[in-house]
Amino acid sequence: MKFCNFLLRVDGVREASLDDFQQVIKVGLRTYKPDRQKYLYSIEMDIIEGRYFWMACDYDDAVRFRDYVINKETGEKEPNPRSKEQIEPRQQFFACYDCNTHFLYLNDLTRRSFLQQYLSETLQKDFQINNIYAPSTQIVITEAIRVLHTV
């Protein structure tokens, strides 16, 4: 799995800390739909090895709904067994913040604004995700992923 790395600043004056993420885990919502956005997120968070903040999100469009589904075996239309209130999350997003190096790793750049808004609203602080300007910011997190897979 490939991640891109960023800097995560709080209130424009400091790097995010382990204390910030412990508070996010303590008070953060596990189901979240940002204002004026169509996606609903189911969120799991943890601190790994006292160093890594890990966030895994399943999400999908909370607005789109069809009153029918197509049976893939028969090709026939059938009534949708889910209600409009039920959402099948078919997409995933992962974020990992290394509290020692202060690098944020995201597997999907399009979820950057979601994470920034979620952290800001959760702690009532201004979280900003900033680019790192280097020859190549695309990396593969090996150590962190190995650690996370053993949990």
Image (cartoon, helix red, strand yellow):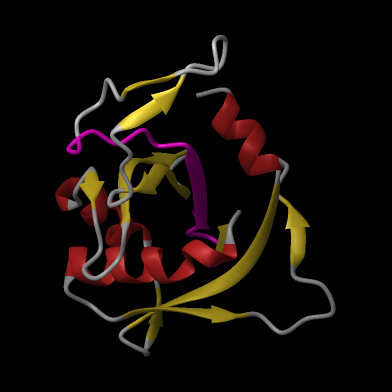
Residue 79 screen position, x and y as percent: 29, 22
When asked about the image quadrant of residue 56, the answer is top left
Residue 141 screen position, x and y as percent: 70, 48
- Bounds of the magenta segment: 84-103
Q: Is residue 55 above or below residue 18?
A: above
Q: Nearer the viewer, residue 28 or 40?
A: 40
Residue 68 screen position, x and y as percent: 34, 29
Q: Which residue is painted at 21% across and 55% down in the image?
A: 23
- Residue 60 vs residue 143: left or right? left
Residue 114 in sight = yes
When asked about the image quadrant of residue 39, the answer is bottom left
Q: Which residue is painted at 32% across and 43% down in the image?
A: 43
Residue 119 screen position, x and y as percent: 29, 65
Q: Which residue is painted at 75% across and 70% down in the image?
A: 137
Residue 101 in sight = no
Q: Nearer the viewer, residue 96 or 100?
A: 96
Determine if the magenta segment contains residue 21.
no
Q: Which quarter shows the N terminus?
A: top right
